[in-house]
Image (cartoon, rainbow, N blue to C red):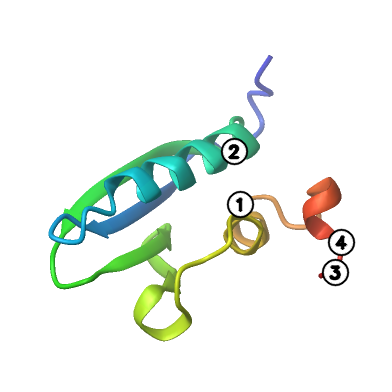
Amino acid sequence: MTDPAVDVTHRVQIEYCTQCRWLPRAAWLAQELLTTFEEELGELALKPGKGGVFVVRVNDEVVWDRREQGFPEPTAVKRLVRDRVAPGRSLGHSDRPA
């Protein structure tokens, strides 16, 4: 049950390149984030793009850009999202150092 005091207005956007056929990768990452942050996120959007784009934004802030950081591991994105939508929350095994 959702706690009414929890702010679920956080929005994640994954912009992916349609020319590169990265929709499956974007959808898989979206599923991972929605499963992990089901009570913290109010919206998760997939945004078609072009030119090799793969960018993850939280509340309009870029937290991952493939051009600068390569393709993300889900645990890395989960940590970045967590830091913005649920600071201090443990991610269990995802928080263990590599």
Residue 10 visible somewhere in the drawing: no
Q: x%, y% of residue 85?
A: 61, 52
Give the label on residue 85, or none: 1
Q: Residue at 41% across / 68% down in the picture? A: 61
Q: Amino acid at mark 3?
A: Pro
Front one among 21 and 39: 21
Of pointers 2 and 3, the one earlier in the residue sequence:
2
Q: Residue at 78% across / 49% down in the picture? A: 91
Q: Are marks 2 and 1 in contact (CB under 8 Å)?
A: yes
Q: CA distance from mark 2 to mark 3?
A: 24 Å
Q: Is residue 52 above or below residue 45?
A: below
Q: Give the residue number, with chain letter if any, for mark 2.
A: 40
Front one among 3 and 96: 96
Q: Give the residue number, with chain letter if any, for mark 3.
A: 97
Q: Quadrant of the C terminus?
A: bottom right
Q: Amino acid at mark 4?
A: Arg
Q: Amino acid at mark 2?
A: Glu
Q: Quadrant of the N terminus?
A: top right
Q: How many marks?
A: 4
Q: Residue at 42% across / 57% down in the picture? A: 59
Q: CA distance from mark 2 to mark 1?
A: 6 Å
Figure quadrant of residue 32: top right
Q: Residues within 10 Å of mark 4 (few under 14, many from 20)?
A: few
Q: Amino acid at mark 1?
A: Val
Q: Are marks 3 and 4 in contact (CB under 8 Å)?
A: yes
Give the label on residue 96, or none: 4
